[in-house]
Image (cartoon, rainbow, N blue to C red):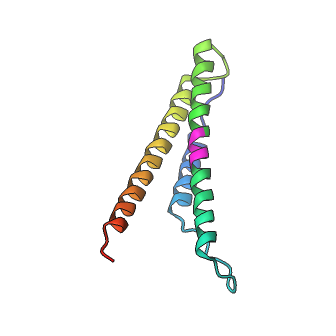
Amino acid sequence: MSTIDTQSLMLQMRSLAAQAASKPDAPVEGVAQTGEEKADNFAELLASSVNAVNSQQQKAGQMKEAFERGDLDVELSEVMLQAQKASLSFQAMTQVRNKLTEAYKDIMNMPI
């Protein structure tokens, strides 16, 4: 059985928090992005975020199944941590969706 390294876990959490707080890179000078290119980048970012949340959910499900089968390599604490990671990533994605929907409604209600 493996033990959880709390120091490593804290470093991972800090790294993820720093990534979430960081701003996207500015475009290279001299290269202007058109509206279509920005939309493609946003669509790619959104798709990759949804895929990341999906992979977290699948990994949590696989770990739960392995623990239920009695796999000695999977500890309950690891399963619970992965389930919490998946839950938090899903909640964050839901909040982003809600904010985007709210922003869309605000824009649609603006007078021309």
Q: Quadrant of the N terminus?
A: top right
Residue extent of the magenta highlight: 50-54
Residue at position x 63%, y 57% in the image: 44
Q: Magenta stretch mostly in which secondary structure? A: helix
Residue at position x 60%, y 19% in the image: 65
In the rendered structure, the answer to whether residue 51 lies left or right of residue 101 reads right
Residue 24, image x, y percentages: 58, 68
Residue 49, image x, y percentages: 57, 51
Q: Quadrant of the C terminus?
A: bottom left
Q: Is residue 34 above or below residue 30?
A: above
Asked if residue 34 lies in the magenta stretch, the reply is no
**Which residue is at the far top?**
70
Question: Which of 90/101 is in front?
Answer: 101
Question: Which of 14/32 is in front?
Answer: 32
Residue at position x 51%, y 32% in the image: 83
Q: How many marks?
A: 0
Residue 62, image x, y percentages: 62, 26
In the rendered structure, the answer to whether residue 106 lies left or right of residue 78 reads left
Residue at position x 69%, y 86% in the image: 30
Residue 95, image x, y percentages: 40, 50
Q: Is residue 6 above or below residue 105?
A: above
Quadrant of residue 14 within the rendered picture: bottom right
Q: Is residue 86 above or below residue 18?
A: above
